[in-house]
Amino acid sequence: MTTMDKETARRHFRDLRRGMTEYERQEAARALCDVIMEGLAPLGIAPGRTVAAYLSTGPEPSTDLLLPALEKAGYDILVPVCEPGYQLSWTRWYDGVELVRSPRAWVYEPVGERLANSVMAGVDLLLIPGLAVDSNGNRMGQGGGYYDRFLAALETLPSRPRKAGVFYSHEVVPAGTFEVTNLDAPLEGAVSTDGWTWFDPQTV
């Protein structure tokens, strides 16, 4: 196997996403919603608890069905906000919340109180976007560095959520597929239309 450098890997996985049909994306959104919702109870995450996710955009795995399903089931939901210095804060999402285009990234963000990383101490599950993940839990991000900085800061908290990336099934790949550096924060798990994968079962 030839290991792709980061830029080559990003082009490769972005091209695969762009090549998906709208029908394939919609089917994946439905399947991901079902897989995630069905996986919460086995993880001991009951309604009334908090899940942090993301507002999907473009061809990335959609949360358009997941977020309303989480709210309907009784979960509190946090989503990220891009801050200066490639940092993230968090704010609450609910159906009907006002959304505005981020001035720093190609995403929409809810209008509301910005919460610091310390809010993660009360979060049970963190669902993270990415382009791909390998079998060692190494995540290929979009290249902005927001999540790598956030995940590094997360390690300083005394209590942390489980961390799982959200991917299409073809984006969960063998170790060595793409370049990894010591700045890349690994994930504990991944979820795709094929189900949940935990890279270290002791974290479950």
Image (cartoon, rainbow, N blue to C red):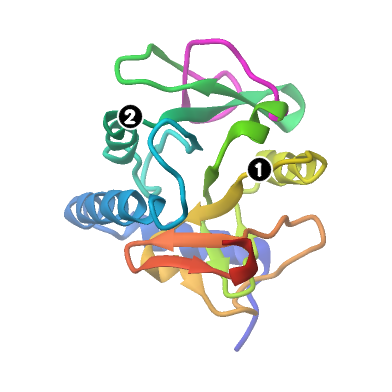
Quadrant where the C terminus sits is bottom right
Principal secondary structure, stretch drawn in magenta? loop
Q: CA distance from mark 1 to mark 2?
A: 24 Å
Tell me if residue 74 comes above or below residue 12 in the rendering: above
Q: Which mark is residue 147?
A: 1
Q: Residues within 10 Å of mark 1 (few under 14, many from 20)?
A: many
**Highlighted range, magenta:** 101-117
Q: Is residue 200 visible?
A: no
Q: Amino acid at mark 1?
A: Tyr
**Front-most of residues 20 and 51:** 51
Q: Is residue 111 magenta?
A: yes
Image coordinates for residue 74, horizontal then vertical, percent: 34, 30
Quadrant where the N terminus sits is bottom right
Q: According to the image, label 2 marks what residue?
A: 71
Image coordinates for residue 73, horizontal then vertical, percent: 29, 34
**Front-most of residues 133 and 156:** 156
Earlier in the chain: of badge 1 and badge 2, it is 2
Q: Is residue 27 visible?
A: yes
For marks 1 and 2, give the one nearer the viewer: 2
Q: Amino acid at mark 2?
A: Glu
Residue 170 falls in which quadrant of the image?
bottom left
Q: Is residue 22 magenta?
A: no
Secondary structure under tag 2 reads helix
Tell me if residue 97 comes above or below residue 83 in the rendering: above
